[in-house]
Image (cartoon, rainbow, N blue to C red):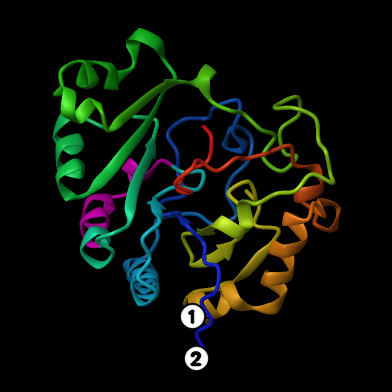
């Protein structure tokens, strides 16, 4: 393997579980099923960690694609091992909070979650509200607790009608230069909006992650999208997602 690091991705979203207990109107799960189903096998997860350890990855790790990570039976050991193997990484847990009780919250915090992003879909009746109301101020500082109305909604690569703003096909997109998704079967997808995996770059069980990242086709796609050539790609040409990186380069606008 020839490792050419260059400009690397700063965010990795890992689909440890494809299932979700909710069917939100702004999510394709409300009327479709993911191409891949089930939980990520541990051998896939640990192969990914090993690849990230080799490059001393210190960016953002999260455990979702379109599923609810707390439905994964291995979430807690995965978080623990992530922090052991990648101690400088920033672990963000995105969840609907339905299954996040106080015990799990404290345990996940102790094992290394740096930030919890919880979306409340029920108002005052949300299960997590009682948990949030009774945790320490220090722990509350690590929790971003949102209502669904506060989310920056988009059409998920054209799958959702009437969601988000207008499509501007020549507008630059920097998502693929900064983030990649690993599906539950180990496939590399270059955008979190590619629900149907139209643009799959390779599988980490067949090729090393860095070799996939350095593949000339993948490099060309990232370059062209950063130049605003969305019209060259099926999902991108109908997508209305215009993300902006925060100053530290670890998160997209919510």
Classify residue 201 as left or right of residue 81: right
Q: Is residue 74 magenta?
A: yes
Which mark is first along the chain, 1 or 2? 2
Relative depth, front residue between 210 and 100: 210
- Report helix, strand or loop for mark 2: loop
**Disc 2 to disc 1, C-alpha distance:** 8 Å
Residue 187, numbered circle: none
Residue 208, numbered circle: 1
Question: Can see residue 98?
Answer: no
Residue 120, how many percent across, how many down?
40, 21
Classify residue 252 as left or right of residue 231: left
Residue shown at 41% from the left, 51% from the top: 17
Relative depth, front residue between 46 and 53: 53
What secondary structure prevails in the magenta region? helix
Q: Is residue 173 magenta?
A: no
Q: Residues within 10 Å of mark 1 (few under 14, many from 20)?
A: some
Q: Which residue is mark 2?
A: 1
Residue shown at 40% from the left, 60% from the top: 40
Note whether 166 is above or below 245 in the view shown: above
- The reply to whether callout 2 and callout 1 are in contact (CB within 8 Å) is yes
Residue 25: quadrant of the picture: top right
Note whether 146 is above or below 240 in the view shown: above
Q: Which residues are magenta?
A: 68-81
Residue projecting furthest to the front? 247
- Across the whole image, how many numbered discs are drawn on residues? 2
Residue 236, how many percent across, how many down?
76, 49
Residue 29: quadrant of the picture: top right
- Report helix, strand or loop for mark 1: loop
């Amino acid at each position: 393997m020839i490792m050419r690091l260059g400009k690397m991705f700063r965010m990795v979203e890992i689909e440890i579980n494809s299932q979700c207990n909710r069917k939100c109107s702004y999510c394709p799960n409300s009327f479709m099923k993911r191409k891949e189903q089930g939980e990520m096998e541990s051998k896939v997860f640990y192969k990914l960690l090993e690849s990230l350890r080799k490059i001393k990855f210190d960016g953002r790790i999260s455990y979702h694609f379109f599923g609810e990570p707390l439905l994964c039976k291995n979430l807690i050991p995965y978080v623990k091992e992530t922090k052991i193997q990648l101690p400088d990484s920033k672990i963000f847990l995105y969840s609907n909070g339905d299954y996040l009780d106080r015990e799990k919250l404290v345990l996940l915090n102790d094992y290394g979650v740096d930030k919890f992003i919880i979306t409340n879909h029920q108002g005052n009746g949300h299960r997590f509200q009682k948990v949030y109301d009774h945790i320490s101020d220090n722990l509350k500082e690590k929790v971003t607790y949102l209502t669904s109305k506060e989310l920056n909604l988009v059409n998920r690569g054209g799958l959702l009608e009437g969601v988000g703003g207008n499509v501007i096909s020549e507008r630059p997109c920097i998502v693929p230069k900064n983030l990649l998704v690993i599906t539950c079967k180990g496939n590399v997808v270059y955008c979190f909006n590619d629900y149907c995996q139209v643009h799959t770059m390779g599988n980490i069980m067949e090729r090393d992650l860095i070799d996939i990242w350095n593949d000339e086709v993948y490099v060309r796609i990232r370059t062209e999208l950063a130049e605003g050539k969305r019209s060259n790609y099926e999902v991108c040409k109908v997508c209305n997602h215009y993300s902006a990186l925060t100053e530290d380069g670890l998160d997209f606008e919510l």
